[in-house]
Image (tube, rainbow, N blue to C red):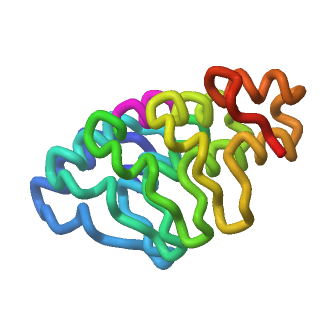
Amino acid sequence: DESAGGDFAAVAQMIAADPSCVTLRDRRGQTACHLAAWYGHSQVVSVLLQSDPTVLRAQDHTKQTPAHLAAWNGHIETLHLIKVHDPQTLVTPNLFGSTPAHSAAMGGCEQAMTLLCEMCPVLWTLRNDQGALPQDICQQNGYAGDDETLAVLGGMGALKCS
C-alpha cells in the first residue's frame, strides 16, 4: 500500500524493519516496485533499488517488469530512473513478446514510447508475438496521425508502419 501511495519514508521504514519485504509479491506476482512504477512513484522505486538493485528485473505472472507498468502509464521520470539503474529491463519482453515500448503504445502513451525508443533504438525494430512494432500499435490505436509522423518517430525516416 505504501508503494502505491508513494510514501517513500514509510517504505524505507518497512525495509529497515524487514528487508525481505522488497521481494514480497501479491496474487498477480507483482512486487512493491511494480506498484510504485505503475503509479509513477520514482522516489519509492529509488528506495527499493537502494535495498535491492535487482528489483527492476522482477516479473509478474505475465512477465511484466516495473518498466512495462511505468511505460503503460507514461511515467517518464520513472522510465529515466529505470534506464540509469537497469537499462536491460527496457528491452525485456513480457509473456506476449511486448517490450515496455509496446506497453507504452498500448497504454496510449506515445511520448513514453518515443522516449524508450530513443533511449534504446533497437526497440524500433522489435516485434511482439503478434508481429507488431511499437509504432504499429500507435497507428492502429490512432495515436499517430500518418505514416510521415511515424517515420519521424521511427528515427531518420527509415521505419514506417506496415
In this view, the residue farthest toward the left is 16
Looking at the image, residue 23 lies above or below residue 113: below
Magenta segment's dominant SS is: helix
Q: Name which residue lies at 17% across and 55% down.
A: 52
Q: Position of residue 83 (x, y in %)?
A: 35, 37
Instruction: Choose top left, top right, bottom left or bottom right for residue 149.
Output: top right
**In the foreground, 66 or 28:** 66
Q: Is 132 on the left or on the right of 102, as rendered?
A: right
Q: Name which residue lies at 68% across and 29% down.
A: 158
Looking at the image, residue 138 lies above or below residue 96: above
- On the question of residue 3 being in view, the answer is yes
Q: Name which residue lies at 77% across and 35% down.
A: 160
**In the foreground, 50 or 127:** 127
Query: Is residue 77 inside the magenta stretch?
Result: yes
Q: How many marks?
A: 0
Query: Is residue 54 inside the magenta stretch?
Result: no
Name the quarter where the N terminus is drawn: bottom left
Q: Position of residue 96 (x, y in %)?
A: 62, 69
- On the question of residue 72 being in view, the answer is no
Name the quarter where the C terminus is drawn: top right
What span is colored magenta in the figure?
76-81
Q: Name which residue lies at 13% across and 62% down.
A: 19
Q: Is 136 on the left or on the right of 88, as rendered?
A: right
Q: Position of residue 135 (x, y in %)?
A: 72, 40
